[in-house]
Image: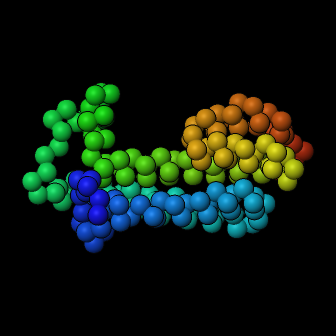
Amino acid sequence: MSDLRLHPFALMGGLTAEDLWVILDIGIFNWILMALLPKWGKTAKLSLIFPILHSTLYSLTFLSLLLFPKEGFEPHPDANFFTLKGLVALYTDPSIVFGGILHSIVGDQLLGRWIVLDSQERGASIMFHVLAVVPCLLLTMLFGPLGWLIYFALVRNFLDDPKKSPAAKEKKN
């Protein structure tokens, strides 16, 4: 049993962040899908499943914390979203940390999805995907905005602009 001050989430049957932690790990399947099957016709839709699942979990986490505060629980007096000190105080609560991790996971997965869809729209070959896009996906999974920035600022420049391609010009006519 954990020695953390865990808040049971009323909207999730009283489960705690520790009980739900394993659900965070299933998001790896989204990264595998995007890395291994970028050209598969179902990747675009299927890659939304885990962000939707994690967004739902995130929403239920914070609604539980706001609507059903733990009896006897007193938030840190400095806790707020507007200062560094306030955020550090907020993150002393493991339930808030769980929500923060969920927030990051959802954002990272959606950034990764955008990278894959953008690279495919720009005509990335499988070789280019393996050598350039997959490393960006790995960096996005681990460090979020860093992977996206490397893709956006560097890798993307080696791909065609779909607005300037002959196919795009034909659509206009």
Task: Indicate the colouring scheme.
Answer: rainbow
Q: In the image, 134: left or right of 16?
A: right
Furthest residue toward right: 166
Q: Quadrant of residue 155?
A: top right
Furthest residue toward bottom: 13
In percent of the image, x 79 and y 60: which residue is there?
A: 39
* Residue 148 pos. (x, y %): 64, 39
In depth, the one of 86 and 168 nearer the eye is 86
In depth, the one of 75 and 38 nearer the eye is 75
In percent of the image, x 23 and y 58: which residue is there?
A: 7
* Residue 141 seen in render: yes
Counting every numbered tag in the picture gives 0
* Residue 34 pos. (x, y %): 69, 57
Q: In the image, 111: left or right of 71?
A: right
In percent of the image, x 13 and y 46: which residue is there?
A: 74
* Residue 50 seen in render: no
In percent of the image, x 87 and y 50: which residue is there?
A: 127
Q: In the image, 97: left or right of 22?
A: left
* Residue 102 pos. (x, y %): 43, 52
Q: Quadrant of residue 57?
A: bottom left
* Residue 122 pos. (x, y %): 80, 46
In depth, the one of 158 and 85 nearer the eye is 85
Which quarter shows the N terminus? bottom left
Furthest residue toward left: 72
